[in-house]
Image: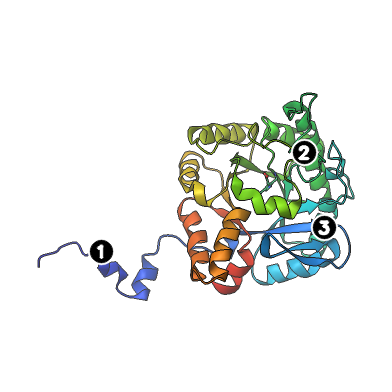
Amino acid sequence: MELINRPRRLRKTAAIRNMVRETKLTVDDLIHPIFAVEGYEIKSEISSLKDVYHLSVDMLEQEVNEIQNLGINAVLVFGVPAKKDSMGTSAYDADGIVQRAVRAIKAAAPDMCVITDVCMCQYTDHGHCGILNFDEVVDNDMTLEYLTKIAVSHAKAGADIVAPSDMMDGRIAALRSGLDANGYKDTSIMSYAVKYASSFYGPFRAAADSAPGFGDRKTYQMDSHNREEALREAALDVEEGADFLMVKPALSYLDVVREVKDNFNLPLAVYNVSGEYAMIRNAVDTGIMDESVIYEMTMSMKRAGADLIITYFARFLAENYL
Ligand code: PBG
């Protein structure tokens, strides 16, 4: 048999496979999400997200020390406040849950990169990601003022990167000018530039108590059928001064990840969201799939073009695979 091309030669031994491996996943790629709650000595597993915990601020020192010992350098902080109101005022309170969490993390681990989620849905009593106008529609420009206050309060608490996830138009420009005007020129913005309206956020909304009280998020989050719109959203955020871009969710949107990566040269994050986590976690826990599927899934996001991966599997991956 005169076969000239035998691709199997490059798969012959583990050593050769390692030599020709194109994608490498490392701990530097991972961002570990943290859910901070009010109270003391609280570490309670989130029922919709196995192995993920609600942590009170006093418990964060231990959490970040463990994460840091595994080599993970970055956390994304979400707050679950005790009180909500129509204007989401606890979101920009200097002593709000995120602001206190950030201070605690920075005190415990000064070298840890602290990223904060900038949004209003956990803080508003109606559960939408912004301020409602008289027609009960999220008012874009009024919301920008509030998002800016939130981002500035996070920067003041010590956040290295603020990550707006609200999907209002013009929020990157608004945040950049607000941060600069308040002396936070070196605080970066990681834009959830390409964020789809997705049912994959279900377990997160249960964890953060942030489901909309009426309607849905389709007037601000993107329509999942669209690809070109993703490129328009990303282009606007680049123009407005984003330092990082993000595509979210990740697993069902890897085509979009590749396109954003090929079209823009900013560092690109993906968010392997709660529903994607729950799906794989359940399949592994019930023995339907081997746990190596967790590594394979995460690595595939990197292969698709992600530089950074926000994942509830960060600790598991660092402990078992990286
Ligand atoms: C807040 C926010 C959401 C997620 C991250 N930030 C929920 C939403 O937009 O409804 C989802 C994260 C996940 O599902 O893991 N706007």
Mark 3 lies on a secondary structure that is strand
Across and down, in percent, residue 220 comes to 65, 33
| Residue 47 % position (x, y) | 71, 62
Q: Which residue is mark 2?
A: 179
**Residue 93 percent across, percent down from the top left:** 88, 45
Question: Is residue 115 visible to the viewer in this orientation of the structure?
Answer: no
Q: Quadrant of residue 15?
A: bottom left
Identify the residue at image location x=75%, y=67%: 63
Q: Nearer the viewer, mark 3 or mark 1?
A: 3
Q: Amino acid at mark 3?
A: Val
Choose between 5 and 290: the one closer to the eye.
290
Q: Secondary structure at mark 1?
A: helix
In contact (CB < 8 Å): disc 2 and disc 1? no
Numbered circle sitting on residue 37: 3
Where does the N terminus fall, quadrant-wise?
A: bottom left
State the mark number for residue 7.
1
Q: Is mark 1 within 8 Å of ligand 1?
A: no
Pointer 3 or 2: first along the chain: 3
In three-dimensional space, the C-alpha distance between marks 3 and 1, rounded to whole angstroms, equals 53 Å
Residue 192 visible from this viewpoint: yes
In the image, residue 192 sits, relative to residue 168, either above or below, namely: below
* Most foreground residue, 26 or 298: 298
Q: Is residue 317 left or right of residue 86?
A: left
Q: Is residue 29 left or right of residue 36?
A: left
